[in-house]
Each structure stands twice: as C-alpha cells, then as structure tokens.
Amino acid sequence: MGVSTSRPCAPPGSRGIALVTVDFPPVNALPVQGWYDLADAVRDAGRDPDIRCVVLAAAGRGFNAGVDIKEMQRTEGHAALIGANRGCYEAFAAVYDCEVPVVAAVTGYCLGGGIGLVGNADAIVASDDATFGLPELDRGALGAATHLARLVPPHLMRTLYYTSRTVTAQELRQHGSVWDVVPRAQVRDAALALAGEIAAKDGALIRLAKAAINGIDPVDVRRSYRFEQGFTFEANLSGIADRHRDAFVGARGNPDATPTGTGTATPTAPRPPSNQPAVPPPDPPADLLPPSTPPKEPR
C-alpha cells in the first residue's frame, strides 16, 4: 500500500524508464500524505539522470478516485482543507513539471484528482474499460477543470463539469487526448512500450523538449488550478461542501463498495511531505482572484 517506484525490465527498450505505482486500497482514493508521496516519487524519478521517461500507473480496481472521503470526514476545521489543497497542487504540479515526459497508464475509473494527474501528463494509454470524469459538484467540491480542459474541447469540458458525467477512453481517443486504448491486461505493457520509444531518444534532448513544450503552453496550469481552489475554499467555508459529502457517504452506506473519492481539493488531514516542510504553492496575482475568494491561508 502506498506509492512505489521501480525500474521495469520489460518490454525491450524499457531502459531509462521509471514506473511509479499508486496503491491505496480499496479504490485508490488518496489520503493527504499519499498526494505528497506521489509528488515526491514523480519528482525524484524525473531528477534521476538515468531516467528518460516516467510511467504513472495504479494497482487495483481503478486508476484514481480522488481524495479519501473517509479521512476527510474524520477531520474538522480549516487546516485540513489547506492540507488537501496543497497536497493535490503538489502532485499535479509534480507530473507537469517532471523533467522528463510522463505517460499515464489508466485502468478503470479516473475521477476527480485522477483528472488532475492525467491532464498534466504528457501522454495517456488507457484500458478499454476506463472512464474519466469530475464528480466535483456532486461531492460539494470544485477544481481540475483546468486539467479536464486539456483532454476535451471547451464546451464539452463545461458540460461534463456541470453534469458530473464521465467519458470513455474511446471517446477521449477520438479527441486526440488518449494515445491508445487496449484491453485492461495490456495497459501497463502498452504504456511501457510508448515510454520505451520516448526513452530511446537522447536523454539531454528529451529533457530540453519537455521544458520547451511546457514553456509554450497557452495556459499556466499551476496558476489556473490555484485560481479554482479559491472557490473550493468558499464552498467549504460556507458549509455547502459538508452537506454534499454527508449526503454522498450516507447514500452509499458502504463507502468501500464503489469509488469514494471526492474532488481534487477537499478537506483531509493535513500532513506535510515526509522530507520537506509543507510550503503552500504560490498564490495567484490579486487581479486573478475572484472578489469572494477567502484570504490566503496562514503560512
């Protein structure tokens, strides 16, 4: 259980690949520390001079179900909300800023925080049973529209966001955001094969290419997501979020029966990463903040 990093030996051409695997049973809904651990693992892999590509995968039933609702509901106060916001921000940014390309190997469901991860990845290989979506409004949360907008056209993104509907891997492939769709048992091998093709390039050039491509992105995903988080604070401080989460958990009865993850930045126990203090991400410029956004968190 947790986040692990390995060096796959197969398929041929996998030299220079790091495989980062997330495993938080039963549904890969990550606790706060899990988001920080994931961020650390991806950053560490990207800094390794022998690595030319990172594959991000998950064990179990699905790729990611967002934030752990059970941990979230056990906590009180605003400090938990701040911890979850920072953890998600760090994990999403780590994937985007990884010094080498990141290939996401998606199986089953990819919800909430999972969209933040794959939306910031460089390539996606998915199983034929994979579904993608943001159930944020049904869970009293907001966020990751920034990342969903990298997967589908603008109007489809809005409709999916407002309705909390999901789309299939096949549909995303039609939009060009999923590279390949394969049977579930073949996803990891297909992702490693793509990573192997990338890793066969000159290591120094592939790092320059990643930096260059990030530099020409039309939207700053860090600042855009941070802007969204201001509204997540507002929903939580007003009590709206708690009402929706309580209703969701109560209606499910057994939260472990189905994916119980929530939005990309909802309250869970705040835990700083094990090897560094919890430093909040930079706040957006004042002119980008909505008038109703709460003040900055205490540092």
Image (tube, helix red, strand yellow):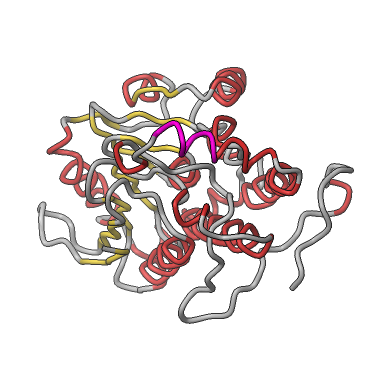
Q: In this view, does 256 lie to the left or right of 96?
A: left
For the residue pair 1 and 209, the one nearer the viewer reads as 1
In which quarter of the view is residue 240 placed? top right
Where residue 74 appears, as percent x and y from the top left, is 51, 58
Identify the residue shown where x is 11% and y is 62%: 9
Which image quadrant: the N terminus?
bottom left
Q: In this view, does 11 lie above or below 244?
A: below
Q: Is residue 185 above or below residue 172?
A: below
141 in magenta: no
Which image quadrant: the C terminus?
bottom right
Q: Is residue 80 above or below residue 50?
A: above
For the residue pair 164 and 42, the one nearer the viewer reads as 164
In which quarter of the view is residue 296 placed? bottom right
Where residue 293 appears, as percent x and y from the top left, is 82, 47
Identify the residue shown where x is 47% and y is 21%: 165
Q: Is residue 21 left or right of residue 246?
A: left
Where residue 174 appears, as percent x and y from the top left, is 38, 19
Count of residue discs = 0
From this viewpoint, is residue 275 visible? yes
Where residue 261 appears, as percent x and y from the top left, is 43, 43
Q: In this view, does 15 lie to the left or right of 90?
A: left
For the residue pair 63 and 259, the one nearer the viewer reads as 259
Identify the residue shown where x is 61% and y is 41%: 143
Q: What range of the chain is rendered magenta?
A: 246-252
